[in-house]
Amino acid sequence: MTSMPPKSLPFDKPALRHGLGGLLAAAILFLAFAPYWAGRADLRLLMEAFGFLALAQMWNLLAGYTGLVSVGQQAFVGLGGYVFFGLAMFAGFHPLVAMPLAGVAAALIAVPTGWIAFRLQGAYFAIGTWVIAEVFRLIAAQFPALGGGSGISLPVAIAKSIGSSTASREMSMYYVAFTIALLATFGVWALLRSHWGLALTAIRDSEPAAESLGVRTRRTKFLIYVLTAGVTGLTGAFIFLQKLRISPEAAFSVNEWTAFVIFIVVIGGIGTIEGPILGVIIFFVLRGLTADWGTWYLMMMGAIAIAVMLVDKRGVWGALQARGMPSIFTTSRNLESKVKSAPVDTSAHAEAGDTVGR
Amino acid sequence: MVWLNALLQGVLLGGLYALFAAGLSLMFGVMRFVNIAHGDFIVVAAYLLMSTVVMAGMNPFIGIGLVVVIMGIAGYLGQRFVLNRVLGKDILPPILVTFGMSIILQNALLEIFSADSRRVQTGWLETVSIQFNDVVAIGLLPLLMFVAALAILGVLQWIFYHTALGRLLRATSDDAEIVPLMGGNNAHIFGLATMLASGVVAIAGVLLAMKTNFDPTAGPSRLLFAFEAVIIGGLGSIWGTLAGGIVLGVAQTLGAQIDSGYQMLAGHIAFLAVLVLRPKGLFPRTIG
């Protein structure tokens, strides 16, 4: 989806795309065996990164495609975490069952909250979602059974039900995180390649135009809001299973679950599937390099977000694409790459059926 | 009687919230964007007051004047050199830039002033009160602050309807694309709007510093209060915003009367209730 004509590349575009797709496939394969080659600290870092990737994909789907800029997604991270703790501790569900249930609960709760938040438009929607997240934070602090304002730890027995030894537990947890990240990324890709994706892309490009072409914009946006809330809740459940402790401040933190996630998406490139992936890598590298700067590290993150908006608001991947970088996760069906050699009609189908980068 | 007292305190608190809201509403009205760092700017003004009056020992009135001037100039420059560059049809860039500013400001304040909770003492002003009976009493300081808030809102109203600047701001609010055709300079008008809003923010910060404890992370909740007062009152009306601030203030003090844990929750719930029952606010648009 480039708006300007691509400049000539030093090498063949389809070949580059196949190369990038291959690189991605290799990286996924490499990460699939991480428990066999990575140390405990690396594994924990990867799990955290997968959590952020899933959150970033969801925020990107919401803001990048439906234009719903929410600064209140921490509502669903926290809800997912709290519902998970509640189900595991009081209803006796196995953690692996409680996690998806927490996601479903977050999606269900998103229906009434969305009904209220959708009364606000644009920037006011953003702050309205933040108020709703604050309400959840304050309510969570009112439940003494879940630790009230000071929080609660997950009983050891529940953590042990995932795996008896530390190693086996961490391995299962790793694959849970890996699955959530893959689900979020490829789920968004599948969604965008479906007829929903066409509607979403149309809404992203021009809402009135989409409306005039028969896209039910409001209903589509609402469904995406509920869907992203569900996956965000599922991710939240995992995050607090990994942390083994939950408190209202940590669960509904706007900095952690919204500001960082927005930075990841924006730095990487909003409105693309590659953007959040690139953003997570950049975010974790920056964090690793500057974590001991304390407050200066956070100030730098803020400055980078501002700089991206001032220099090129498409982000790193968006800027690369504008210079002719091909998509790995192709969601558009265009004719440009094969129009020189092949007849137009067949090339369109070839592109549409293409699953490069799987 | 306790409830009557809580109600009175809530009304007085509402004046401060209306002042928080006025700056936010002014910027939205003219430029159609919401400043996520609004609450942090209020807190910055509070720290500026502390630096000038408490730390440097300036005369309080000179100190307050200085805070207003600094904030006004910073607002104008920030608008011209940063925010104007990201305003447009896309709502995300201004949200993100001000979100970034919010994080930078909070951490810069933390770095300079530490995480300690501060307050600017006002001496005898704090202890004098008008006693109606043994329960109902109005403190002189809250009363003065309410009067100050009313005065500032009155001045804003006067600027909007009786000055050339006000005419420009109203014209820009009605249709920003037409104003340049009539010889207006949008970049400059936006700068002036933010300068005016920052002046109000400065006063709001000064009052905040005298009224309650504040720390570097106090900004976001002030942003939410400001936003709630704007929406409760209905967009685009100064006196509606005052009503919104009062509704929010009363909801909070009544909530606190039930249980101290309910103060914030009651305010948010009042806001959500208005949003459900009267999405356009209690007093919908009278001016643009």
Image: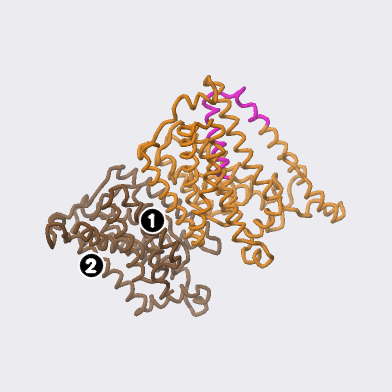
Label 1 or label 2, whichever lies nearer to me, is 1
Q: Residue at x 60, y 50 (%)?
A: A61
Of residues A143 and B189, the one drawn nearer to the viewer in this rendering: A143
Q: Quadrant of the C terminus of chain A?
A: top right
Q: Which residue is mark 2?
A: B147
The residue carrying pointer 1 sits among few (fewer than 14), some (14 to 19) or many (20 or more) residues within 10 Å by Cα, namely some
Quarter where residue B189 is shown: bottom left
Of residues A91 and A28, the one drawn nearer to the viewer in this rendering: A91
Q: Which residue is mark 1?
A: B269
Q: Earlier in the sequence, mark 1 or mark 2?
A: 2
Q: Residue at x 68, y 64 (%)?
A: A214
| Residue B256 in view of the camera | yes
Q: Secondary structure at mark 1?
A: helix
Q: Which residues are magenta?
A: A29-56
Task: Give the distance between the C-alpha atoms of the residues marked 1 and 2, in whole angstroms.
Answer: 27 Å
Height in image: A94 above or below A234? above
Q: Examine the residues drawn in magenta and state their main secondary structure.
A: helix
Left or right relative to A330: residue B60 = left
Left or right relative to B13: residue A105 = right
Height in image: B229 above or below A231? below
Q: Position of residue A299 (x, y in %)?
A: 43, 45
Q: Position of residue B220 (x, y in %)?
A: 38, 52
Q: Quadrant of the N terminus of chain A?
A: bottom right
The residue carrying pointer 2 sits among few (fewer than 14), some (14 to 19) or many (20 or more) residues within 10 Å by Cα, namely some
Q: Position of residue B156 (x, y in %)?
A: 33, 72
Check residue A40 in the rendering and tell me which mark sits there, or answer none.
none
